[in-house]
Image (cartoon, rainbow, N blue to C red):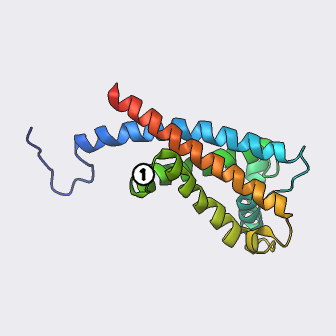
Amino acid sequence: MTQTTVPGARCAPREMHGETRPRVGAGLLAALASITVNALLLQFAHPLGVKTGGSALQRLLVAFLHPLIAHSGLAHGWGTTGLPAPGSLPFSLTFHYATGVAMAALYVLALEPRLPGPPAVKGLLFSLLPWLVNGLVVLPLLGQGALGLAALPLAGVAYFFMVNAVFGVLLGVLYARFRDRRQVA
């Protein structure tokens, strides 16, 4: 089959779209399942009495963006729409799913093909990225120290690591399974 290109065109050839669509679909399904398990595990921390570094990115963004949003009038506009407030459970879950899907997109589209090992190992290796960014950038910016150790018990740091590892392993395994099924179909 001959391929024609249009000068200045930005789209990839059809063959490229054919390869990407199954990956994106499989990645989205894997992401939703993995994020759901991740969110449930984070919710289980509270009844267990474990304080984790969960929702740190959301807290950091709200802290940094609040003055800008308040002065721009966006806060008033947001409040009049009936949308959930930044501290509410619906807002937190939406934020959690949005960041999880973004992380899964990074995994599927950029990192998974480059990571070594079987799917579970790839996912576990990937899980180190969000955990380290949270522990070495986000939590210190919130004044909680490296890995949150200035504010969190060691059990909380370990639990948060485990929850991220479960997210990564599930993402890796489910993505590979869904991708392979879509390629066969």
- Identify whether 36 is placed above or below 61: above
- At label 1, counting other C-alpha atoms closer than 10 Å, the crowd grade (few under 14, some 14-19, many 20 or more) is few
Please indicate whether residue 146 sits to the left or right of residue 18 in the image.
right
Residue at horizontal 61%, vertical 36%? Answer: 33
* Residue 168: % across, % down: 59, 49
Residue at horizontal 48%, vertical 40%? Answer: 175
Please indicate whether residue 171 sits to the left or right of residue 72 in the image.
left
Figure disc tally:
1
Residue at horizontal 74%, vertical 60%? Answer: 73
Which secondary structure lies at badge 1? Answer: helix
Give residue 37's quadrant in the image.
top right
Under mark 1, the amino acid is: Leu
Residue at horizontal 67%, vertical 72%? Answer: 137
| Quadrant of the rendering where the C terminus is positioned | top left
Single out the residue that lies furthest toward the left: 2
* Residue 72 visible in the picture: no
Q: Which residue is mark 1?
A: 109
